[in-house]
Image: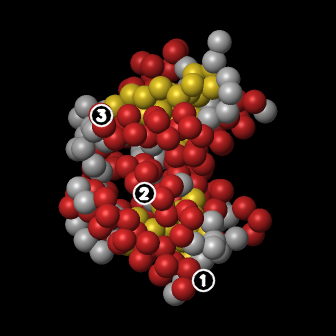
C-alpha cells in the first residue's frame, strides 16, 4: 500500500488544491500518494500578511483531523502558515513549500532569490531565510508587475510578468537560483524552468522531495 502524504492548501480554492495535488503526485516516487485538503475559512488566494497569519489555525486543525490518515504533511502556501504549530503538536513529519524550496535553492552554496506576485507578503518572505539560516545566501524577492488576482486570471500575462521577475533576480540581484514563491503558481513555475540557465525552483516538487526524504530516512 502506498504511503500517503497530505497536502494542505491554506487557500480556499478547490481547483488550486487539485492543481497542486496533481503536480505533487507527478513529483512523487513510486510508493507514495499525495491527497489534498482545502481550507474553508481563508480567501481563495492569500495575498496579505493578515490573511497568512489568519490561515495558520485552520491549517493546524486540518492537520490534526486528517493526520491519522497520512504519513506526512505538506503545507502548500509559501509563508508556511501553521507549520510550526503542526510540528509542535504532532509527531508526523511536516514540511512547507516555502522552506523546502529555499533549502533546495541554496544547495551547493548557491545564492538565491524569489520571484512571486504578492508584494504585501514581502516581510514574511524575507523572514524565511532568517529562520532557515540562509540570510547570507538570499538576494531578495522580485514581484511580478500587476495585481495578484488579475495575474492569476490571465496565465499568459502571469507567465510573462513572472519571467521578468526571475530575470531581475538573476541580472540585477546576482541570483544563482530563483524560487517561484507560491503554491498557486505551481503550473507556471514548471513552464518557466526551461527558459533560464539557472535553476528555477518550483516549490511543490521541492516539498514533495523533502517529505519523501524524511519518510524514507
Looking at the image, is 175 positioned above or below residue 132?
below
Which quarter shows the N terminus?
Answer: top right
Which residue is rendered at x = 75% and y = 30% of the image? 216
Q: Nearer the viewer, residue 174 or 79?
A: 174
Q: Earlier in the sequence, mark 1 or mark 2?
A: 1
Q: Which quadrant of the view contains residue 178?
A: bottom right
Residue at mark 1: 174
Where residue 207 sits in the image (x, y, percent)? 58, 44
Residues at marks 1 and 2 touching, judged by CB atoms closer than 8 Å: no
Q: Is residue 163 above or below residue 183?
A: below
Residue sitting at x 77%, y 65%: 108
Closer to viewer: mark 3 or mark 2: 2
Lower position in the chain sequence, tag 3 or tag 2: 3
Left or right of residue 91, residue 119 in this image: left
- Residue visible at 51% across and 15% down in the picture: 69
Residue 141 visible in the shown view? no
Q: CA distance from mark 3 to mark 1?
A: 37 Å
Place of residue 182 in the rendered image (x, y in percent of width and height, measured from the top left): 42, 54
Circle number at residue 14: 3
Can you give x and y, in whole percent of width and height, for residue 39 in the image?
31, 33
Q: Which mark is residue 136?
A: none
Tell me how far mark 3 sits from mark 2, CA to CA: 18 Å
Report the Cα–Cα distance between label 1 and label 2: 22 Å
Q: Residue at x 55, y 62 (%)?
A: 193
Q: Secondary structure at mark 3?
A: helix
Secondary structure beneath disc 1? loop
Which residue matches tag 2?
Answer: 188
Q: Mark 3 or mark 1, which has the lower sequence index?
A: 3
Amino acid at each position: 500500500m502506498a504511503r500517503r502524504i497530505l497536502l494542505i492548501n491554506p487557500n480556499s480554492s478547490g481547483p488550486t488544491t487539485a492543481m497542486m495535488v496533481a503536480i505533487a503526485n507527478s513529483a512523487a516516487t513510486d510508493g507514495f500518494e499525495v491527497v489534498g485538503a482545502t481550507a474553508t475559512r481563508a480567501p481563495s488566494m492569500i495575498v496579505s500578511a493578515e490573511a497568512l497569519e489568519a490561515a495558520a489555525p485552520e491549517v493546524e486543525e486540518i492537520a490534526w483531523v486528517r493526520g491519522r490518515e497520512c504519513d506526512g504533511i505538506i503545507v502548500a502556501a509559501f509563508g508556511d502558515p501553521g507549520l510550526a504549530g503542526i510540528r509542535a503538536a504532532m509527531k508526523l513529519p511536516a514540511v512547507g513549500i516555502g522552506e523546502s524550496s529555499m533549502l533546495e535553492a541554496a544547495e551547493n552554496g548557491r545564492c538565491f532569490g524569489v520571484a512571486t506576485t504578492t508584494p504585501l507578503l514581502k516581510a514574511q518572505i524575507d523572514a524565511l531565510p532568517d529562520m532557515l539560516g540562509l540570510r547570507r545566501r538570499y538576494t531578495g524577492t522580485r514581484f511580478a508587475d500587476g495585481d495578484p488576482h488579475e495575474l492569476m486570471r490571465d496565465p499568459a500575462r502571469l507567465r510573462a510578468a513572472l519571467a521578468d521577475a526571475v530575470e531581475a533576480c538573476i541580472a540585477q540581484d546576482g541570483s544563482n537560483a530563483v524560487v517561484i514563491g507560491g503554491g498557486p503558481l505551481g503550473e507556471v513555475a514548471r513552464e518557466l524552468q526551461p527558459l533560464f540557465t539557472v535553476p528555477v525552483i518550483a516549490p511543490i516538487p521541492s516539498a514533495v522531495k523533502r517529505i519523501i526524504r524524511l519518510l524514507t530516512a
